[in-house]
Image (cartoon, coloured by chain):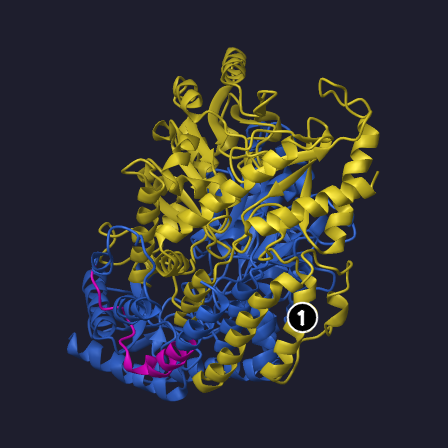
Chain colours: A yellow, B blue
Amino acid sequence: MGPEEFRAAGHELIDWIADYRARIPQLPVQAQVGPGEVAGKLPSRAPEEAESFRRVLADLEEIVVPGVTQVQHPRYFGWFPSNATLSSVLGDLATSGLGALGITWQSAPALTEVEEVVVEWLRELTALPEGWKGVIQDTASSACLVALLAARERATNYSEARGGLQAENAPLTVYTTQHAHSSIPKAVALAGYGRDNCRFVGVDPVTYAMRPEALAAALEADVAAGRRPAAVVASVGTTGTTAVDPVAQIVPLARQYGRWVHVDAAMAGSALLLPEMRWLADGVAGADSLAWNPHKWLGTVLDCSLLYVADPDHLIRVMSTSPSYLRSAVDGEVTQYKDWGIPLGRRFRALKLWFHLRLDGVEAIQARLRRDLDNARWLADQVSSTPGWRILAPVNLQTVVLRHEPDGVVSATGAVLDPGALNAHTLSWVDSVNTSGAALVTPSLLDGTWAVRVSIGAEPTERQHVEELWTLVKQAAERAG
Amino acid sequence: MGPEEFRAAGHELIDWIADYRARIPQLPVQAQVGPGEVAGKLPSRAPEEAESFRRVLADLEEIVVPGVTQVQHPRYFGWFPSNATLSSVLGDLATSGLGALGITWQSAPALTEVEEVVVEWLRELTALPEGWKGVIQDTASSACLVALLAARERATNYSEARGGLQAENAPLTVYTTQHAHSSIPKAVALAGYGRDNCRFVGVDPVTYAMRPEALAAALEADVAAGRRPAAVVASVGTTGTTAVDPVAQIVPLARQYGRWVHVDAAMAGSALLLPEMRWLADGVAGADSLAWNPHKWLGTVLDCSLLYVADPDHLIRVMSTSPSYLRSAVDGEVTQYKDWGIPLGRRFRALKLWFHLRLDGVEAIQARLRRDLDNARWLADQVSSTPGWRILAPVNLQTVVLRHEPDGVVSATGAVLDPGALNAHTLSWVDSVNTSGAALVTPSLLDGTWAVRVSIGAEPTERQHVEELWTLVKQAAERAG
């Protein structure tokens, strides 16, 4: 496709996107298709001859749109905000249009240097420690794996340079909580520590945050048994309840053993742009790394995760390679981001962050985040003051964990008397809300029974939409009995 | 930014991209900036207030464009083709505009099912074994790491579910060649095998392909010493010389020990779309996995790597997680790609492949690949028939590895008599070509001395541009003495 054909099709597609975004509020939130329905509409072989753009666009409209859950919908309250701000979409289009190749500084100096500048902008905006250096990864899953690889190599004095983890004698252990995101035990497993060596430290029964005394006990028990603590992964804003592990208390415990502390703030990191929310990261200056995802609440279109490290030289030593065809005269003077993560080839992801921050401006972004926090407090107030409803976890951020508890299934002290009936009731009304297409919320297990997460923060979600959600939820729960 | 503001800015950006692509031939190929030059033009803090789109676009033009090496240039012959076809750029814009979230099938059924269909289209187009299943990864680096994690878990009967690699007694070993891409030993190190356990098997002195008898000897020696072979990574089209390891001979050797064979065809995979080039993958039906990058020669804009596996159930067992908030009623009926790789959150990358194949059509893509193969053969013929010049490796694909060898530095039998002088000469003329901005080629060490890779295959590169390159190269080498 040549530039002129692209120009014509591109204008059509821009108009299509603008129109699509404008009509999202009229679409069902949850995709209304069954397994195999989308695939069944597609031919089984690639076309030999070029098809018209009009035809491809028609399939986008008729096959793809009904087949995606509309996470840009104002009544999307599902997993977590996954905003794709249109300012960042423009940045991402610039990236693809440029078609630059990020393998070394030399292959695209601007790709490296815009990234350095923009991750530093965000370090300053989120008040992370001066001197920490950042890099864009695809997701917090990869960032956590990278952090645990760095931790493994610190704990083993670079075993990768010798016989690897398999040459180590005493098993290395990693600590997090049962409320940690699934990507953390996954990273523990993939990094070769073994799932048995992942300790799920106990949490406070009210806040669901890691109990420092339980961490201390777990560390001591492992050391006494001849094991070697390698890393603690603290969650700042867990997926289930937005619980905040106390980083300031965790750091000195890990430091006793000289071990790595990684802070997983995938969702909550956006809140660090608000000075009044910086308590979330209290103590982070003593940690080794922190990751958060602008592709969630902040709204830089997928995929964009920021990993900050206190000691980039260590990370580079763990990750670096230098084949002859990638060497250049400026090595040593420039940042080579290929040595800060797993992939060699890197997309120019910094442009979408750059466009996003510049075209929206920091003040407007902060105002939106504050709006969402206000909306969550408003909803929590409604729930708390409505008989038969309960808030199940502190509302630290923009997520409200709630439950409708009909008479008789929960005791006066809050103990669940009939978990089977309560779970059936919860899943029933959640399903009726979600399948209606009017809104989407996500159920999640909490202390063994199902709770409902209302994760507020889609870019178009105003108070009115939260009010509508609350009405929908009450009606659905009452209808479910 | 609202839809109408996006519409206006989007039209401007589409026009800018169309104009930019049209004028790339007038730009210097290699970025003409020094370290820190781009960063020095950017403010040190993010803007509090929104900036105009015009201003951001002006910076894109004035700061970013001069700061990237123009890999979409017709005289780009550097590292490898990194085509960003405009058809795939449209698909990627659709992805960002949709703003879908890929975490589970439920979050975006079309994201999963278009991916399943399109990777199957490409499986069939590349004649990979029926029944193999594919998934899109970001890069071949990640795909190789995933394959080596799968290999590790097969060799240890799922040690990750227990004490991990550190609980294993006999060291696991991995086999590849010294011509393997740097991402392979990196993946060996990251997966915890240890660099000492990565065996660089000897290559044929003429073809630079793995010698099966050397592999057999290495396997036998390790087994005799009590070590356990875990994986062989065969390179089909190495980065240095596009050497092709003999997969058909490697597979039975690895099979003796029941071990994983991963085929790294990152660059060369595109050639499998041509029936006459399928010899590259002879024997692949006995392997376990293969990865190749549509974001290279094929031209689906970064990042897009395909990983195919013979046994997806094994991969899923190694990679899967199932937290309560990601469970749904259709689990078991659908593909959950989160369990096929490292990241949980996945971009809708299949759209760019879908747009690319449909808007360009397979025949036109095949014709372009054949054009590039022809151009490489043409250049090789010129080099071979020109006194003082030599082809240093078989031209299996679209890369020509050449050298200018002035009188006296190389003997009549091809032995390098004065490597210092030859290296200085080579690096000097390459530098003069590259810094001129007229073309870009990449030097690479081969048998200890520098050679020059001319990697043909940028989308706009026609015979005329290869002729121009050959003239430039001859002039530069003659001027260098």
Residue A173: % across, % down: 52, 24
Q: Which of the two residues, A278 or A234, is positioned nearer the viewer here?
A: A278
Q: Is residue B27 visible?
A: yes
x%, y% of residue B372? 46, 80
In-front residue for pair A168/B197: A168
Residue range corresponding to the magenta coloring? B14-34
- Secondary structure beneath label 1: helix
Residue reaching furthest to the bottom: B464
Tell me which residue sits at (52%, 81%) in the image.
Answer: A9
Quarter of the image containing the C terminus of chain B?
bottom left
Name the residue carrying label 1: B121
Q: Main secondary structure of the magenta part?
A: helix
Percent position of residue B127, x then y: 67, 70
Report whether residue B299 is seen. Answer: no
Residue kind at label 1, given as amino acid type: Trp
Front residue of B238/A364: it is A364
Q: Is residue A46 above or below residue B48?
A: below
The image quadrant of residue B364 is bottom right
